[in-house]
Amino acid sequence: MGTQGAVKGVTHRDLESLGAQILLSNTYHLYLRPGDDLIARHGGLHRFIGWGKPILTDSGGYQVFSLAARRTIDEQGAHFQSHLDGSAHSLTPEKAADIQAQLGSDIAMVLDECLAHPAALDLARHSMERTLRWGRRGRDRFLALREGVVPGVTITNPGQAQFGIVQGSVFPALREESACRTVEIGFEAYAIGGLSVGEPADVMYDMVSRTTSCLPGERARYLMGTGTPSDLVESVARGVDLFDCVLPTRNARNGQLFTSEGRINIRNARYAEDDRPLDPACRCYTCATCSRAYLRHLHMANEINSSTLNTLHNLNFYLDTLERIRDAIAFRRFESFRVAFHQSLSRQSHDP
Amino acid sequence: MGTQGAVKGVTHRDLESLGAQILLSNTYHLYLRPGDDLIARHGGLHRFIGWGKPILTDSGGYQVFSLAARRTIDEQGAHFQSHLDGSAHSLTPEKAADIQAQLGSDIAMVLDECLAHPAALDLARHSMERTLRWGRRGRDRFLALREGVVPGVTITNPGQAQFGIVQGSVFPALREESACRTVEIGFEAYAIGGLSVGEPADVMYDMVSRTTSCLPGERARYLMGTGTPSDLVESVARGVDLFDCVLPTRNARNGQLFTSEGRINIRNARYAEDDRPLDPACRCYTCATCSRAYLRHLHMANEINSSTLNTLHNLNFYLDTLERIRDAIAFRRFESFRVAFHQSLSRQSHDP
């Protein structure tokens, strides 16, 4: 999760040594500051931030809905004021495609409407239909950009792919219809949006299953904004290939750490004298060199290094979990891995 | 400058790869949080923070004078309230030695009185005399600790050295007397305190010369709290071996960067589109991978990585300057290096 072209607290060098394969950057943030025009003049986001591996950009919609001031949504798109300086902007499906073309990410996301949970069926249908219309417009613009017939937009990555987004709230029929009609529009691959917004886990898992069963097997499936380590395992079991999530990095900065023995809140006084590593089973730099007592000290003293060391560990934990999932699949033992994973989880204790 | 057992913004791993040979930690901060007792129970500061190379601790006096609330100084020592929780504490020459014995740094500093600049001659003499009395008491305690006759204090580093501190404000006669009488007390090596407190550079250089000429040539000489790259060169020319300074790290966090072409304020709008590295002559990670435009973006967006990347560069610049000084001395061309250094400096432009 590299909001502004950087993962908070860790350098690209650290990310690469952790084995990170793809970086997510937020279109909303980069559009407002430093601006996609500036980044395009520098040859695109890869070159601007010095990251050679793949980059995925979101459409900007989610941040407009969650961060911007005085936002209104109509059929045309989202209209809002910048949270930085109050300036007025509009984000349409076409504009979202244009900005991402200038950023030159490897994967661009189409603009969708983000619906709050819970939503009534008629509202969810209305929103899903709009997302489909926006999907059509976004795809048309993406194809026009690819053909070079959009003046004023600099294409910095001719190989960019665009993913469509399935909506439909928690209604199985809507999810299935949204998936089928999004596939009809035709994108390089497909994402599942509008989940992890407060619904129970079993509902989310059910929606994931309903959606993936309608998506083509040969295309990547991306579950947006999810989730806990357990969510990753359960979503992979339902056919998901790609995730993004703020949990490992945001929790790290708040002192919430994932370990093979359960979740640790490093602020807890019980760690003041604890000279064990965070996670004895972990081989990250933080666990190799720091005690819980030292990490607690750095966190209580508000040292920048607390964020860095905690983030290194949580990212390693997530990337390691995904690697274990991939290995289990490769060796055809994913189901036994999944059972063992949940058994281990049920034995864990978690700090409040 | 590792205030709380960590250099702000960079990991120990980064410091080691930059070639840092010694870390300074602040006794005042560590005494208040997490406490020298806790650190002693963990086997000392090296083990607690996971840093195997040398550590120097200050006496705690400077932070008491600059940070603590309701501080009073008398012959016994400094009495103050914690800036964290208002709790009452006293720091005496004996207590400063005890705390540092528990921290187990490789170099401990004796408690001295820090005088504000400017100071009248009689006040400066009075303070210098007190620093000498405190020096005697601090040394006696250090020797008693070494002999193991102080109950209740855990010695975590039997090989600890203790440096005396020369004071005397800007009065040559006081500096010389302070140096001679501090040497009479007898320490493993000697530091020059009370400079870089607002006096003109030429006065500081003169005081350094006056002091080093009275210190034994076979013992290290440590100039405390200094300074700019130029100060380093001029102080080495006057016989100084060791420095500590907050400038490279604090300036880095504020966006003030040292380069071979002059000082850069990365907030400056002129860097918004500048795709050159900070310093084309620099081989640090930041200069190898980031443009000025990207560094400006990260700084304006208040990203943690801005502090990390800027600090890596400034530390590299300082450590590289010191390495060039050492090489020049080794190859018996320090004087020509010094002339070239200042000529280069005079051609540089500096951002406001």
Image: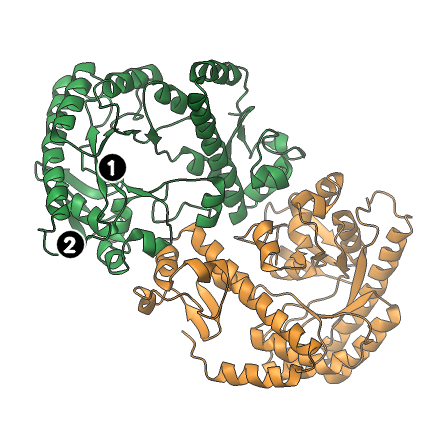
Chain colours: A green, B orange
Instruction: Find residue B194 and name its label.
Output: none
Q: Residues within 10 Å of mark 1 (few under 14, many from 20)?
A: some
Percent coordinates x, y for residue A183 in the rendering: 16, 27
Residue A47 located left or right of residue B246:
left
The kind of residue on which mark 2 rests is: Val
Which residue is pictured at 8% across the width and 40% down the height?
Answer: A76
Task: Name the kind of residue labelled 1 in the image.
Answer: Tyr
Crowding around mark 2 (Cα neighbors within 10 Å: few <14, some 14 to 19, many 20+) is: some
Numbered disc 1: secondary structure: helix
Do the numbered discs 1 and 2 sit on residues whose CB atoms are within 8 Å? Answer: no
Q: Which residue is mark 1?
A: A62
Q: Chain of mark 1?
A: A
Question: Where A155 falls versus A130 (above or below)?
Answer: below
Q: Nearer the viewer, residue B70 or A63?
A: A63
Q: How far from the left and from the top, in percent, is residue A180?
A: 15, 22
* Chain letter behind tag 2: A
The residue sitting at 57% across, 32% down in the picture is: A282
Residue linked to disc 2 = A153
Question: Is residue B116 placed above or below B45 in the rendered structure?
Answer: below
Foreground residue among B279 and B138: B279
Depth check: give the residue in front, B182 or A303: A303
Q: Element type at marker 2?
A: loop
**Left or right: B324, with A80 as reference point:** right
Q: Residue at x 39, y 25 (%)?
A: A232
Image quadrant where residue B25 sits: bottom right
Q: Quadrant of residue A160?
A: top left
Task: Name which of mark 1 and mark 2 comes first in the sequence.
Answer: 1
- Which residue is rendered at x = 67% and y = 73% of the image? B326
Residue B271 screen position, x and y as percent: 34, 67
